[in-house]
Every structure is written in C-alpha cells, then in structure tokens.
Image (cartoon, rainbow, N blue to C red):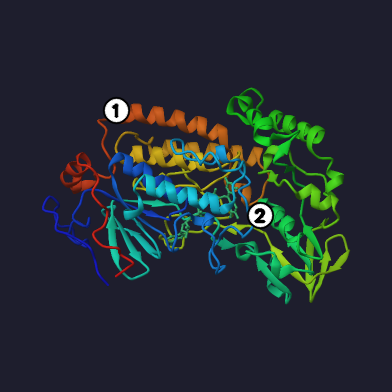
Amino acid sequence: MTEHTRVNPSRPAEPGVASLRPLQGRGPMVCIIGAGVGGLSMARALKRKGIAFDCFDRRDRIGGIWAFDHSGQHTSVWHSMNMNTPKGLYQFSDFPMPRHYPDFPSHRQVHAYLDSFVEHFELRDSIHLDCPVQRTERLPDGVWRVTLGSGEVRHYDALVVANGHHNTPNFPDYAADTRIDAIHSQQYRYRHGYQDKQVMVVGVGNSGAQIAVDVSHDARMTYLSLRRGVYVLPHYLFGIRIDKVMGCLNDWWVKKILPYPLSGLMFTGLYKALIAKRKQLGMPKPDHLMMSSLPTLSENFANRVGDGKLKVVPQVQRIDGNTVHFVDGSQLDVDAVIYATGYHTDFPFLPAELLKVEENRIPLFQRIFLPEVPNLAFIGLFQAVTWGFLDMMERQAELTADYFAGQYLRPEPDSERQHIAAERKVIEREFLATPRNNYEMHGPTYLHYLAKELRQGRDRATATGNVSPLLVQAYAYDALSALAQPQASAVESDPCQG
Ligand SMILES: Cc1cc2nc3c(=O)[nH]c(=O)nc-3n(C[C@H](O)[C@H](O)[C@H](O)COP(=O)(O)OP(=O)(O)OC[C@H]3O[C@@H](n4cnc5c(N)ncnc54)[C@H](O)[C@@H]3O)c2cc1C
C-alpha cells in the first residue's frame, strides 16, 4: 500500500491528523467517483476552471451504463438497445452529437460520442479505469482520504460522487424463493437466449417495457407483469418526434401557469385523446396523472401487443416452480423471468454515518450538496420527468465547479435544509408514492431554478470575496497559487496500473 502525501509547511501539526500536506504535490485536487455521463460532466467542468482532479471508474471503459458490458457484472445497455431520448436532448451544450446520428441513436453511437467527448476535451489522462474506489473517509480537517481497490490511499480536497443509481438491483420479496430461470434487468444483454420460450418481464419502467419488446421478437410469448397502469409514449406522433409535439408543453413556465395538478391533467387528457386507448394495451387504468411519474417511452410497445406477441398480466403474488400466481387468482406457466424492478441507491464507499438513504430519499440541496458537508457533491442523483438527463448533469457539474472555484457560494446550511424540506413536500404532493419517485423531479423546472440559484450564489460569492471551499484551513497558500496556474496533470502515475 502506498500513501501519497507531502509536507505542507504552511500547515500546523494537529493531534491525531498527520501533519502532512496530502495533495500529491499540487494545489487543490478533486476526486470524482464514476466516469459515466455524470462523472464526465464533472471532469470537463473542473478542467474548464483549471481545477485538477482524478476521476476513478471501476470499469475498463468510460461511459457508465452506455459502455456495453458482456460480463453482466455491471449495469449496462443491452445488445439491441437504442437510446429512448431524442439525440438533440442528450448531448453536451457545446459538443453536439454527430449530424449523421439518427433521432434515437444506438447505444454504440452514444458510447462513441462520449468517447469523442473525452478525447476532444482532453480528459483521458485524468481518468483512471479499472480503478474502484473502495472507501472514503472525511478526516477531521475536512480532507477526503480515498482508498482505491489496489489498496493505494490518496487524499483530496473535495469529493464528487457520480457512481450512478443503477448499481444494486432491487428484487421483489417473492424472488428469493423461486427456482425458475430468472435474472434482473441489470444482467439482460441478448434476447437470443429466450428463443421459443415463454418469458415474463416484471416491471414496466423504461427498462421493463423495452426489454419486453426486445424479448418478444425471439420468445414464443412474452408477458409483462405490472402493478399499475402506466403511460406509454411512442417516439413519433403523426410522424413528428414526440418531444417536438409535447416537449414545449413540458416547459417550466407551463408548469408555472398550470401548477399541479392542472399540467398533469392537461397531459393526461392529451395522452388519452392522441396516443393510446389504454384498453388497446391491455393495461389497468393508471392511478396517477401522466407527469406524476416518469412516462415509459417505447415506440414498439403497442405494436407488439397488437401483434399478439406481448401481453400485459397482473401483479405477481408468488412463483411456484414454473407457475406464476397473480394477485387476481389467475396463473401462468413460464420458462424464464426477467425482473425489471429497479435499483437501490447506495454508496458503499461513503462513511455510513454521512448519508442514510431510505427508499431513495436523499436529502441534498439542489440535488447536489449535503448541507453538513462543504466539500462533497453528488451528480446525477435524480429521476426526472423530462426528455433526457444529460443536460441536467451538465448543469449540476457546472454549478459544482463554480462552487469549488469560489465563484458560487452556497446558502447557509439551515437555509439549505429548509429548501430540502420544501422540496420533499413537493415530491410527496406531485409524484406517485414509490421508491423510484422519491428522487423524481420535473426536469425543466429544476433547470430553471438551478440557473436562478447559480445567479444568486454568484452574487453571494462576489459579495464575500470569492473564496474557494477547496482552500480550506491551512491549505490556502498552496492552493491559491495552484488555482492561478493552468491545470497540471492530476496524477503522476496511473494508480491502478501499478
Ligand atoms: C438500461 C438503461 C437505459 C437508459 N436509457 C436512458 C436514455 O435513453 N435516456 C436518458 O436520459 N437516460 C437513460 N438512462 C439513465 C442513465 O442512467 C443516465 O442518462 C446516465 O447515463 C447516468 O449517468 P451516471 O454517470 O449518473 O451513471 P452511470 O452511467 O451508472 O455511471 C456511473 C459510473 O460509476 C462507476 N462506479 C460506481 N461505483 C464505483 C466505485 N466504487 N468506484 C469507481 N467507479 C464506480 C460505474 O462503474 C459507472 O461507470 C438509462 C439507464 C439505464 C440503466
């Protein structure tokens, strides 16, 4: 085990804390956990500010879920998957997706795009792959002590958590007692293994609906078990891309003049009039308004139901052998089950006392900051009623980088807590009460108020002298001079390559 430290002459020795300047011989350093879209957004935002960072990912490629994983060990796209977000709505603001990409690019295209983003902004040298972060501790002086999978220990002035929230699969209670051939959607990669089988997919979020459609091309028959009816949006309506037809109605100002439940009623009415008669899909009537939960986007769902290859079935009560018993008393024999039943959000590398996540309730100011901790940020911890998540992560990263650079100042912790409490009330009022919706938000409204918060925080920062929170305690001299210099390469050696 090696420990990168250096003596900081400006810092007095403290009892219990090594009197060393733990910054690998440089100015302020940020550690980013995860090189998915969230981590890459953060990396680029820090690079723009000239703040050095190390970005660690346990996988051997950048891109997070967009990097196809043959092993089934990590959450990733499946072989035939296309993005269900229109391309113009999942791209960095100053780095558009290639013009020749189709409206809904394949996962390979999305990954190639992210790869070219890393090249273009010269981020590669600071990204360390095959490099899991095992443990982090916040030392009494605020510095983060980060232990990597190799056993190496590094120290950082700030930590950015961008590990995604699709890491730990959630299974229904009855799954543990079943002997049937079953996987979680996290492991689903190819449909060919299901050829000529009777397959049941459990759960009708975006993954469940898309996997059911995919499997239905090879399976003898595919069943989709759901607890409640959902709204299924096609990719095109009257030949026009769905976001172009309905996107403008989802803008923040529409929600402002038509507050909940009016905007939800408007969407629900339009859905009924223009898109689907729910009986055609065989679904129960949704028990919520359309924008009270993330709608399911699937071009082919209705077609597969119409072709008789996909059938909606009720909620499962239990599975005995190969027989599925449903809550309405009916039963069905199947050969295989795919649980598309979501994920638990967890941060196994964070100190347990720092953040307790129950059913995806995460008390973060602006979905980014823990009020108690000045040098910790989270990127991408949300579900949003919107058309794509990338722009939201990009804005979160920009605000965080502004904060680390001293150009944005957070409100007082009490004010942050009040904001979090008010937001929780909105979630409880406007969104369906499920664990997935516990970190739901209305994307355009969030972006609007995040921009407002950034403006206000910039004014606060200017008024108080633009002090960077990275320049904590006795590190000020060292870090100030480094901030003034162009960014140095973040590490001398690759920590996971020996
Ligand atoms: C199957 C699927 C399809 C989706 N399709 C869409 C879509 O069409 N449109 C859309 O807007 N969104 C989609 N999403 C949501 C998608 O998750 C986000 O758009 C975005 O890709 C999430 O990025 P992220 O960086 O937050 O997380 P991830 O992409 O999950 O990246 C997190 C990274 O952190 C790494 N990591 C985790 N723990 C550690 C650790 N301890 N040490 C080091 N590294 C670690 C992981 O290896 C991973 O690379 C989809 C999600 C899934 C699961």
Amino acid under disc 1:
Thr
Amino acid under disc 2:
Ser
Classify 10 Å Cα crowding around label 1: few (below 14), some (14-19), many (20 and above).
some
Marks 1 and 2 in Cβ contact (< 8 Å): no
Marker disc for residue 28: none
How many marks on residues? Answer: 2
Point out the tag, 1 or 2, that comes first from the N-terminus: 2
Q: Residue 111: where, in percent of width, then height? A: 51, 52
Q: Residue 324's image quarter?
A: bottom right
User: Circle 2 sits on which residue?
Assistant: 207
Q: CA distance from mark 1 to mark 2?
A: 45 Å
Q: Nearer the viewer, residue 349 or 151?
A: 151
Above or below: residue 389 compared with residue 74? above
The answer to whether residue 123 of the structure is visible from this angle is yes
> Circle 2 — which element?
helix
Q: Residue 138: where, in percent of width, then height? A: 33, 57
> Circle 1 — which element?
helix
Q: Nearer the viewer, residue 239 or 317?
A: 239
